[in-house]
Amino acid sequence: MRFTGKTFLITGGARGQGRAIALKAASEGANVAVVDVAKDVATVPYPLGTEEDLAATQEMVEELDSQCLTLTGDVRSQADMDRAVAETADRFGTVDVLCASAGVHSFVPFWEMTEETWNTVLEINLTGVWRGAKAVAPRMIEQRSGAIVITSSVMGHETGPDLAHYAASKHGVLGLMKSIAFELGPYGIRCNAVLPSVVHSAMGENPVTRKWIFGRDDATTQDYIDATKHWHLMPGRPGLPPSSIADAICFLASDDARYITGVELPVDAGHMLLPGFNHEVVEKADEPVGPWY
């Protein structure tokens, strides 16, 4: 029960990784506040969490004998983030841990991407993290304690086709994390990031994502499971369960990690150890061929 008497505030907590964090923290005694936009967002091509999902998260947390506050709010709004922090503190007396978990993606070549598509991903995945941290920092500074855990991605070090906005956002939050850790460290506040590989959740596995992977409309969940095994070095690991990310986040939020700040923790079943390979070599007709010295 590492979190008895502690309060977690989790963005993007209606389902998926955010819900898994809420359940893991609650199982170890935490009070939990969950904020989610709970509606679809323009330019995000798959359904987002709903108010029914938020209610289900609350019910699951309360079944673990923990208290749960659910809030609808958009990380693109500083007023919403300020309100989420204020209502969480009013309800539970403090905010000890911020888990900045809200995130989205879409698939568009960068030169075809609209400004709205670019801005949506950057505003949610990067600027939304800054807004949440900005909202919670004064309270943590006052109490001289706290932990902020940011969800980045292995795409914080890599890239892929049609994901320039997503890669930029996930690279960006790593720089932001280090700056937050540096500035808040003297107040006893830690900040770290988790870098998930592909995660089997509604964000990671849906018709739009399957079509992007396979290039066809009829790809199935089983196709997704079989394909994502190839992302990982360790055997038998397809898309990772959201609980695996929650375990790492709760470790970084706990006193077990009290001497750890400013670090990037991959949770990727060895994905980042795999050598790269270009499967789509295009030979240029007029390119001279060997010998090379």
Image (cartoon, rainbow, N blue to C red):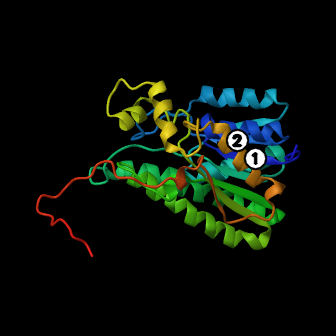
Q: Label 1 vs label 2: CA separation?
A: 9 Å
Which label lies toward us, 1 or 2? 2
Above or below residue 176? Residue 102 is: above
Secondary structure beneath label 1:
strand
Q: State left or right for residue 256 relative to residue 245.
A: right
On the picture, is 103 further left or further right than 53?
left
Q: Residue at 60%, 35% (x, y): give it.
A: 16
Mark 1 is surrounded, within 10 Å at the Cα level, by few (under 14), some (14 to 19) or many (20 or more) other residues, namely many
Looking at the rendered structure, the kind of residue marked 2 is Ile
State the image coordinates of residue 134 (x, y, percent, origin top left): 64, 61
Residue shown at the point (58%, 50%) measured from the top left: 270
Q: Quadrant of the C terminus?
A: bottom left
Label 2 sits on a secondary structure element that is helix
Q: Which residue is mark 2?
A: 21
Q: Amino acid at mark 1?
A: Phe
Q: Is residue 205 visible?
A: yes
Residue 132 vs residue 164, the one in the foreground: 164
Nearer-N-terminus badge (1/2): 1
Q: Nearer the viewer, residue 148 or 266?
A: 266
Residue drawn at the location 59% of the way across and 43% of the way down: 234
Looking at this rendering, what residue extends furthest in the left direction? 286
Q: Quadrant of residue 145?
A: bottom right
Query: Which residue is the site of mark 1?
Result: 8
| 1 and 2 marks in contact (CB < 8 Å) | yes
Instruction: Point out residue 25 in the picture as x, y percentages from the top left corner.
Output: 77, 42
Residue 72 shows in the view: no
Q: Position of residue 151 (x, y in %)?
A: 60, 51
Residue 279 vs 140, above or below: the answer is above
Total marks in image: 2
